[in-house]
Image: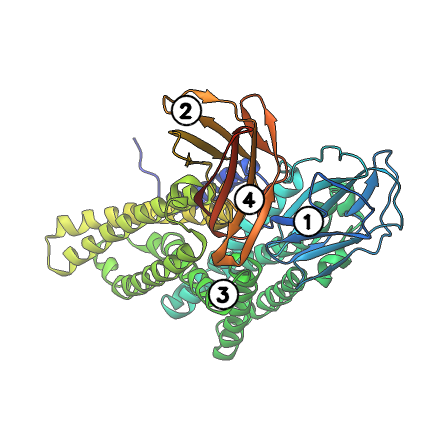
Amino acid sequence: MTNLPARTRRPRRVRALLFALGALLAAATVLLGAVPADAHAVLVRSSPVDGSRLAAAPARVVLTFDEPVQLVDGMTRAFSSSGTRVDTGDISRSGGDTQVVVPLTPDLPRGSYTVSWRVISADTHVVSGSISFGVQQDAASAAATGSAAPTSLDVVAQTATGLGYVGVVLALGVALLARLLWPDTWRRRRVRLLVRAGGAALLVGALVDLLLQGPRADETGWHGVLRLDGLGETLAGSYGQLLVARIVLAAVGVVLARSLARRAGFAAYSVAQFGVLVTIALAGHAGVGADVVLAATAAVAHLAAMAAWAGGLLLLLVAVLPGVTGAPDLDRLRLGTWSIIAFVSVAVLVVSGEYQAWREVQPVASLWSTPYGVTLLVKLAFVAIALAGALAAQRMVARRRSGAGADAASVSVVRVRRSLRIEAVAVAAAIVVTSVLTALPPASGTYGPAATVTAPVGDTGATAVAELSTTRHGPLVITVHVTDRNGTRVDPELVTGVLSSPDNGVAGIDVTLTHDGASWVSTDAVVPIAGAWTLQLTVTIDQAHAYATATTFRAW
């Protein structure tokens, strides 16, 4: 078979790499389409309590969440059972933006009422739900709190996030390595095009995210995008302002990329790209919760290290290695210096990643029992594959330096290329998985497996068994049944419950339990705060025998 000329093979290799990158982005789109649009803010209590029956009409409804939320214009309302609006429209926030206050029209008549809400959590995810209460009658059932299945807008928005990560690699990683380590490559048109494509990816990704944020929150679809629905509300919030800053900095970077060959232009370009990293960090999980400064610093370091590692690999494969024809050329590639840069990048990735994992993956069990934790494990697997490829390439270069034979040296050129390709594909896959991670709530924000706790019923030998639908703080369903000493279910006359948490200063929250067959099921139980909780039960077997008992559990 006739060998293809080098000039023919090289473009094909470049096209193959670009095709692989495109395939990974397509895979990310598919994965993002399967990711539920999980919300991060949790309703921990309401006044009135969901499902309560009131003797008199309340003046307002207060919804309390576990983190600050942003209102979606016109999406929090109160209705009567006939569909008539009964709120005044003056919806506001209080309590450090963790409470939503819904004023009601005065003197509501007897009836059942529902308050529906749709808000944006601190990390931009949308959460919705409703509660109900009755005035002088029982309340109608309200829809469960949660979030809708991902829409096409959600998929496009998250794909834009992934595009932003690609932009960071190209605009920052490729540019810095081309300027500092392999300056000769900057004269090549393909390298300059990669850097400009990175700047364009940052611009497009941020602009798409900005335009889609409002329609996603308002659920107005693509027509809402054309009408710029919610743009004003988005720009008024911190997330929208960070996106605007990113757009401006990315645009500045596109302009400054033309002067990267000059020292002043390179310095200004680096500052602009650093600013882009800061906006990405603050707009993500690092910008929410405690220790924001430290978390954002770790996120910026993580992004910069990722860009350096991935950008250097891409530059090697696209612009550096295609010019290598034999072992002597391999010695001029400064692979020793690149190995140091790659090692430092990996070290920064590990340290910053460990901190981010400690912050967002708690407890350890959430690493394999939540979508975020499992996805993080997948990312770590790809990083491990990339490290194996890097180690193989480094050993081959070391053998060349040690004076191996000419034949072995020639073979090492081929093997170095192969190892670097494996490393590059694995790093690209890790970046794709990272974009999926941004669509998921942190493991520490969703962990709360169902649990079953028991308590003895006096000295009768009977046991009260309480099944908790979740151990995540917030609403939960508690199902209690009683078994005798032989494990046979008995049907007590009455079961009442109280939740308390001395560590959190909560003296007692009454739990209403209703009879359902041989079990007693809660109707409005809420654990408002994470921590150690005690469930106190009073089990009345018959009119002559009642027993108080208690059991404990951990709420996350």
- Which is nearer the N-term, disc 4 or disc 3? 3
* Secondary structure beneath label 4: strand
- Mark number displayed over residue 2: none
* Secondary structure beneath label 2: loop
Q: Residues within 10 Å of mark 1 (few under 14, many from 20)?
A: some
Find out whether the residues at labels 1 and 3 contact each other: C-beta distance under 8 Å: no
Left or right: 304 with respect to 394? right
The residue where tag 4 is placed is 498
Residue projecting furthest to the bottom:
264
Measured Cα–Cα span from mark 2 to mark 3: 55 Å
- Mark number displayed over residue 484: 2
Q: Point out the frontmost of discs 1 and 4.
A: 4
Q: Quadrant of residue 136?
A: top right
Most foreground residue, 464 or 428: 464
Q: Quadrant of residue 146?
A: top right
- Mark number displayed over residue 296: 3
The residue where tag 1 is placed is 46
Q: Which residue: 45% across, 54% down?
A: 360
* Secondary structure beneath label 3: helix
Q: Quadrant of residue 51?
A: top right
- Amino acid, disc 4: Val
Tell me residue 278's x, y (percent).
Answer: 53, 66
Most foreground residue, 462 or 390: 462
Measured Cα–Cα span from mark 1 to mark 4: 18 Å
- Which is nearer the N-term, disc 2 or disc 3? 3
Tell me residue 487's x, y (percent).
Answer: 39, 22
- Which is nearer the N-term, disc 1 or disc 4? 1
- Amino acid, disc 2: Asp
Measured Cα–Cα span from mark 4 to mark 3: 41 Å
- Which is nearer the N-term, disc 1 or disc 3? 1
Q: Point out the frontmost of discs 4 and 3.
A: 4
- Which is nearer the N-term, disc 1 or disc 2? 1
